[in-house]
Amino acid sequence: MQKLSINDIKPGMVLAKPVMSDKGMPLCTEGTELTDKLIDRLREMNISTLTVKGHPVDTGVPDKTAEKKIQEMAARFAHVEGDPLMEQIRDAIASAIEAEAREMEEQEAQEAAP
Amino acid sequence: MSKAEKIKSITKKIHSLPTLPPVVRKLTTVVESPDVTAQEVGKLISADQVLSAKVLRLVNSPFYGFPGRISSISHAVILLGFNVIKGVVLSASVFDIMEKSMVGLWEHSLGSAIISGAISRKLGLSEPEEISTAALLHDIGKVLVRVSLSADYDRITRIVEAKGCSFREAEIEVLGVDHADIGTWLSEEWGLPEKLIVPVSYHHEPARAPRLKERVIVVHIADSLVRAFGVGYGGDRWVGKISKEAWEFIGMPQIDLPQIMRKILADLEEVDNFRS
């Protein structure tokens, strides 16, 4: 999935996440195919970003890899190094980041399949 | 000088408290009245359209457990109670003042509220909504330092950069007290209920909390985890040490840690929806 500014949204793209109004009420469900009319309506309702399926726009900025995310996360633990509880927490977060990355990969593979 | 005297001398320096919209002041008085109804409170908040949109957005986020289902303020008051509404209205207004310059702290607070909600529900604690609201307010003292003691705030941030220490250590060096002390004073000034004040006061030292220990500990843990996940900015980039006693006191060793971290990771994506 990819998070895009509404200005980069084209008809035919499919929502990977529901869209919420500025009051937190659901406007469109996941799986909705976007049309010109719908994009205009969402723009009128001040929606600025949407998350769509696949990776339709090449932003030129590669997504952070799980490995990079874990590295950055572990660096923030510098002040509590050697504390057994904090190390346990750090490792649990690392495994959560890895699990999320695996799930995303599987999802994208499924989307790519006909 | 004792801590109480220090706080007193600091608060004397504060000429301008963050100005809250009149509706917040009215709300504070109205909810004290024993026979106030949810409709009356709802009507009062709804009169301010910008504020009520913000409140609805917060109460519809996943940390309150009714995502996308609360359509009116009076409905929110009935489901969540006066304490939660009061806390949400206050944090929405306070961070509104700071919107541009303290967006990092706002996201740190939202993230803490999300994590507190996830942990409280997992542990089956009572009133998880109030615990999330306490987390939303836990660093309110930092806002006051920034708004009302801006010269001191600049010194604090310079020390954090130069020494690589925590914001709190630098606060104590400059002010002799920390944002938890200042936040306590402010919350009392604003007439917040004790259930919200105690976690603000003791989120760095849960062992010292005289009451409401479970709530204090959840906020203490959330404050550290939100930093670990890299959401928002609490004044420095360091993950703080979680007290092992506190961790065990609320039964964290009994829960599946990788699983709750996975849930928190997914829930935290919600913070993005407040950035627009």
Image (cartoon, coloured by chain):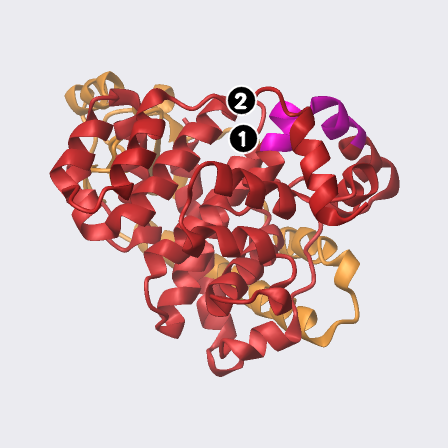
Chain colours: A orange, B red
Image position, residue B61 (x, y; %): 31, 45
Is the residue under label 2 in contact with that under label 1 (CB below 8 Å)? yes
Quadrant where the N terminus of chain A sits is top left
- Which span of residues is magenta-colored? B144-155
Q: Chain of mark 1?
A: B
Residue B40 inside the magenta-drawn segment = no
How far from the left and from the top, in percent, is residue B169?
A: 78, 47
Viewer-closest of B155 and B242: B155
- The residue tagged with tag 2: helix, strand or loop? loop
**Residue B154: percent from left, percent from top:** 76, 26
Q: Are callouts 1 and 2 both on one chain? A: yes
**Gap in Å between the C-alphas at discs 1 and 2?**
6 Å
Residue B264: % across, % down: 45, 59
- The secondary structure that most of the magenta stretch takes on is helix
Asked if residue A21 shows in the view, the reply is: yes
Q: Which residue sits at x=51%, y=36%?
A: B106
Within the image, what quadrant is residue B6 found in? top right
Residue type of the residue flagged with mark 1? Val
Q: Nearer the viewer, residue B111 or B83?
A: B83
Chain ID of residue with mark 2:
B
- Residue type at mark 2: give it: Lys
Magenta stretch containing residue B153, yes or no?
yes
**The disc label shown at residue B103, or none:** 1
Which disc number belongs to residue B100? 2
